[in-house]
Image (spheres, rainbow, N blue to C red):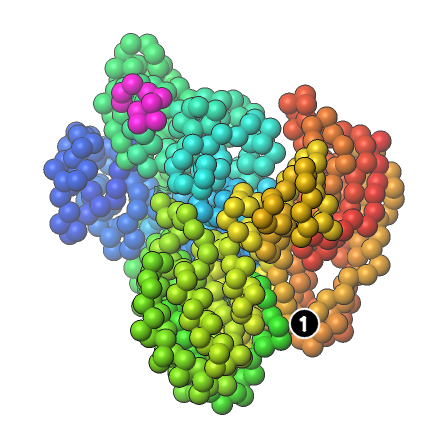
């Protein structure tokens, strides 16, 4: 809080203050859109006052520098107080230049890359006048049915925390006017929706919340994130937006967050639908009492806060606090000095989708891709005489991801274009089948098989449409459609030199594909330069180095399946995985192990891990141990490797996960090159939410692991004394 913002606050009437913390759509203030405004149009249900809407502090979602200027002009011309708007917008995996979905970026295991990509997004968005993005999404996820796993960085709290921090640093960092504010979401545990169904019930214990779900939000806060968005779901029976334990006790009091808290879209009214609030007035009370500053796209504050203050249920001081937080945010963003901030239609044209940004998006897609299987067909030889590109995702730009924000399919490089740019006219395309998950149409098979037969190698683009993941897009079946398998089988009859390029917004249960396909390169939803990246990876211009951060199940029945689970009292031994062992924690009709474990991903080269060392066998608080390993590139290509470091706490006052990621490093090694990688172990890294309901370490034994993926074996033990 500054003298300046306090002074502004002192000039505001109570009605102005209340409207100031309402958030409505930017479109309301853009006359050229000819969109009926909020008074008469579709938003009229909000029943907002036609003068006071010009006192709102923030708006959401609408892209374009000219549009922003028009909105700010219009707003300031009509506003009595002339307090400029802050424009907020979802910028999730890029703004105009899209990079891979966040689940892909996490697979790069590369913090610097995540930071660089966020910087690019911030720069493009700032030039469109955006002040804050609703990112990073830091929700831990375990259920691939949930459509929003694509926005997350996966199932591991440490990795999620690292990615959230890198993203906040990139968005808010050191680019001056090109930075934008970040808003971590969805607080809390939105990713734990039961049965992977969006907006569904979340029921996690305080321990699970603390250990698994909260660390990534906390990490964003420690990195200085400016805002927090509450989640749609309930926690312990209370919707997050009105959840005092979450917002007041944990976020404000325990973590000391004094930035802006915003609800998710329409969440105030949803408290009524949840059955947690009687009416809008109660919703306003519950949210304000819990500490939610901005109401997004409902009008409970506008209609009831004054009354609640008059009745003494909410104090004006509480309202003032929220208003001040938003004013402080505006000051920090520079909007008090310049309502137009960094908006620049000319510069936006130069910078957005510039060759440099496209190159970075391509790098992002290349580093995110995960080679899931390779029987030796990959990399294909660039000198081949003919390439068949087949599949419903082969010649479309609709592979850039479902949070496309300002990105467009027609600006996205399809795999067809990517291959043609790399290889020229020897690439021919046939669609083969339709992308709809319920399509049974085989009428295009013959043409595709003919092409496959006449070509030296086949790139088969399979998977799911980009709109099958993302908000509200949950799936009850996560295998490929039967028609895609049939197409693959038919193609294999005429050509075995086949690689599948897989496009997906989630882990899929593709055991059958794993059996059938000679090679599988998972591209996720790779963004604007997806097709170029795919071509480069398939033809060995770039060596795959991504590793999955969310487990791929063998079958949906194993879900939720994640590497950092507890052991149970009757674990099934790993060596018995394929056998039936009665009365162990297992299935009679499926192994316990996943198809591809957390941290898994192949390369065209090979890496040898040797000389594992731990610097000591005992450690006291304040001391440190060093774990190290030598890694040698023993293959034929210069390549990158994500080295992973795990610890297991063997016994605790509460049971501990079988393994926890505690560090990772992305190395680049030349052919024959060897490097030593070290990881530090300190006492704070061993803390967890103990039986005392505190973050603390407990004395005892710990196992140490370094490896290529989460299945690596322990190589040493130490004791915390
Ligand atoms: C989503 C948020 C998003 C908001 C604003 C909601 O439906 O859950 O993630 O930021 O809309 O677009």
448 to 372, vertically: above or below: below
**What residue is rendered at 79% in x and 43% in y?**
703
Q: Within the image, what quadrant is residue 539 found in?
A: bottom right
Closest to the observer: 70 or 148?
148
Which residue, as the protein is rendered here, is positioned at the far bottom?
385
Mark 1 Cα-neighbour bin, 10 Å: few <14, some 14–19, many ≥20? some
Whether residue 32 is visible here, answered yes or no, is yes
Is 224 located above or below residue 510 in the figure? Answer: above
Q: Which residue is mark 1?
A: 605
- Residue 568 magenta: no
The reply, left or right, for residue 98 in relation to residue 495 is left
- Residue 191 placement, left or right of 67: right
Quadrant observed for ligand 1 in the rendered image: top left
Coordinates of residue 628 in the picture (x, y in percent): 80, 54
Image: magenta residue range: 271-280
Q: Residue at x 72, y 49 (%)?
A: 576
Residue at image coords 52%, 38%: 217
Residue 702, position as x, y percentages in the image: 79, 39
């Amino acid at each position: 809080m500054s003298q300046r913002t306090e002074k502004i606050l002192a000039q505001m009437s109570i009605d102005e203050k209340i409207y100031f913390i309402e958030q409505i759509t930017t479109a309301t203030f853009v006359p050229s859109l000819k969109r009926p405004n909020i008074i008469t149009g579709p938003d009229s249900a909000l029943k907002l006052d036609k003068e006071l809407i010009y006192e709102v502090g923030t708006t959401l979602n609408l892209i374009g520098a000219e549009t922003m200027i028009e909105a700010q002009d219009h707003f300031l011309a009509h506003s009595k107080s002339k307090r400029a708007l802050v424009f907020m917008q979802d910028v999730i995996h890029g703004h105009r230049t899209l990079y891979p979905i966040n689940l892909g970026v996490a697979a790069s295991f590369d913090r610097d890359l995540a930071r660089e990509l966020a910087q690019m997004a911030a720069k493009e968005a700032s030039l469109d006048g955006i002040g804050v993005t609703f990112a990073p999404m830091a929700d831990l996820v375990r259920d691939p049915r949930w459509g929003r796993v694509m926005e997350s960085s996966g199932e591991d709290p440490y990795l999620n925390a690292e990615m959230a921090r890198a993203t906040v640093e990139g968005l808010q960092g050191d680019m001056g006017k090109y930075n934008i504010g970040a808003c971590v979401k969805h607080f809390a545990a939105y990713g734990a929706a039961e049965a992977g169904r969006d907006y569904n019930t979340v029921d996690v214990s305080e321990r699970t919340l603390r250990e698994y779900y909260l660390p990534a939000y906390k990490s964003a806060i420690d990195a200085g994130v400016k805002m927090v968005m509450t989640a749609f779901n309930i926690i312990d029976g209370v919707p997050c937006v009105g959840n005092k334990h979450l917002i007041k006790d944990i976020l404000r009091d325990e973590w000391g967050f004094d930035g802006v808290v915003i609800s998710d879209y329409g969440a105030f009214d949803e408290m009524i639908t949840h059955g947690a609030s009687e009416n809008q007035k109660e919703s306003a009370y519950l949210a304000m009492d819990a500490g939610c500053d901005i109401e997004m796209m409902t009008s409970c504050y506008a209609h009831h806060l004054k009354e609640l203050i008059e009745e003494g249920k909410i104090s004006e001081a509480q309202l003032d606090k929220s208003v001040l937080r938003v004013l402080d945010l505006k000051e920090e963003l520079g909007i008090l000095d310049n309502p137009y901030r960094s908006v620049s239609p000319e510069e936006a044209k130069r910078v957005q989708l510039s060759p440099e940004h496209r190159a970075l998006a391509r790098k992002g897609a290349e580093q995110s891709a995960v080679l899931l299987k390779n029987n030796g067909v990959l990399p294909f030889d660039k000198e081949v005489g003919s390439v068949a590109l087949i599949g419903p995702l082969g010649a479309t730009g609709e592979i850039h991801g479902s949070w496309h924000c300002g990105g467009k399919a027609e600006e996205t490089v399809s795999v067809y274009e990517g291959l043609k740019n790399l290889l020229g006219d020897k690439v021919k395309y046939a669609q083969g089948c339709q992308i709809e998950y319920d399509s049974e149409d085989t009428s295009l098979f013959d043409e595709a098989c003919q092409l496959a037969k006449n070509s030296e190698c086949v790139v088969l683009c399979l998977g799911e449409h980009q709109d099958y993941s993302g908000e509200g897009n949950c799936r009850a079946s996560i295998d490929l459609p039967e028609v895609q398998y049939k197409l693959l089988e038919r193609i294999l009859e005429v050509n075995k030199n086949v690689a599948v390029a897989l496009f997906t917004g989630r882990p899929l249960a593709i055991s059958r594909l794993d059996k059938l396909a000679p090679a599988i390169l998972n591209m996720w939803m790779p963004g604007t330069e997806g097709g170029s990246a795919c071509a480069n990876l398939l033809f060995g211009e770039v060596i795959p180095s991504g590793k999955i951060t969310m487990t791929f199940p063998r079958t949906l029945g194993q879900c939720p399946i994640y590497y950092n689970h507890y052991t149970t009292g009757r674990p099934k031994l790993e060596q018995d995985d394929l056998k039936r062992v009665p009365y162990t924690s297992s299935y009679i009709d499926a192994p316990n192990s996943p198809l591809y474990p957390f941290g898994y991903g192949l390369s065209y080269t090979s890496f040898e891990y040797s000389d594992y060392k731990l610097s000591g066998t005992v450690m006291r608080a304040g001391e440190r141990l060093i774990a190290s390993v030598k890694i040698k590139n023993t293959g034929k290509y210069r390549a990158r490797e994500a080295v992973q470091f795990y610890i297991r706490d063997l016994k605790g006052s509460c049971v501990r996960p079988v393994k926890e990621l505690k560090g990772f490093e992305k190395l680049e090694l030349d052919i024959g090159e060897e490097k030593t990688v070290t990881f530090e172990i300190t006492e704070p890294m061993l803390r967890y939410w103990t039986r005392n309901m505190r973050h603390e370490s407990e004395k005892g034994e710990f196992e140490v692991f370094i490896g290529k993926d989460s299945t690596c074996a322990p190589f040493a033990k130490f004791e915390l004394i």
